[in-house]
Image (cartoon, rainbow, N blue to C red):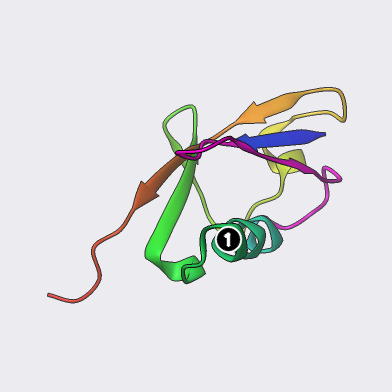
């Protein structure tokens, strides 16, 4: 399946298996953007995609789907 992550320049398109943990996707996005993976979150259809707890299969998505996710910068510290 494909996952499209918005970017200021051009979207990052990742081709992954439905069993790929979202942590790997977080790591790829972080590397692409040059930031830490804990400094943002990915959401799909209003649902937060937890790095260690979910896969595309958990969302009942199949290999033919394109998952458009939103990218939200989190504020760290307090």
- Image coords of residue 49 (percent x, y): 53, 48
Is 52 left, or right, of 55 in this rendering?
left
Residue occupying image coordinates x 52% and y 36%? 6
Asked which quadrant contains residue 52, the reply is: bottom right
Is 43 above or below relative to 30? Answer: above
Judged left or right of residue 42, residue 1 is: right
Range of the magenta residues? 5-21
Judge by depth and name the residue closer to the eye, 50 or 11: 11
Q: Is residue 44 magenta?
A: no
Looking at the image, residue 37 lies above or below residue 3: below
Q: Specify few, some or many for label 1: CA neighbours under 10 Å numbering under 14, 14-19, or 20 or more.
A: some
**Residue 21 placement (x, y as % from top left):** 72, 58
Residue under circle 1?
51
Residue nearer the viewer, 10 or 4: 10
Residue at the bottom extreme, as displayed: 77
Residue at the (51%, 66%) spot, across then down: 34
Residue 17 location, quadrant: top right
Left/right placement of residue 53 relative to residue 62 reads left
**Image point (44%, 69%), residue name:** 38
Q: Please, what is the dominant secondary structure of the magenta stretch? A: loop
Which residue reaches farthest left?
A: 78
Instruction: Tell which residue pokes out farthest to the front in this image.
Output: 9
Locate residue 75, reporting x and y percent: 23, 63
SS for callout 1:
loop
The structure residue drawn at horizontal position 83% and vertical position 28%, both measured from the top left corner, is 62
Q: Quadrant of the C terminus?
A: bottom left
Count of marks overlaid on the render: 1
- Quadrant where the N terminus is found in the figure: top right
Left or right of 76 on screen, residue 20? right
């Amino acid at each position: 399946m494909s996952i499209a992550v918005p970017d200021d320049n051009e979207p990052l398109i990742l081709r992954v298996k439905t069993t790929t943990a979202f942590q790997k996707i977080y790591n790829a996005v972080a590397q692409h953007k040059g930031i830490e993976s804990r400094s943002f979150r990915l959401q799909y259809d209003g649902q937060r995609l937890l790095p260690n707890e979910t896969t595309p299969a958990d969302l009942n998505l199949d290999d033919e789907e394109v998952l458009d996710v939103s990218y939200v910068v989190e504020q760290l510290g307090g």
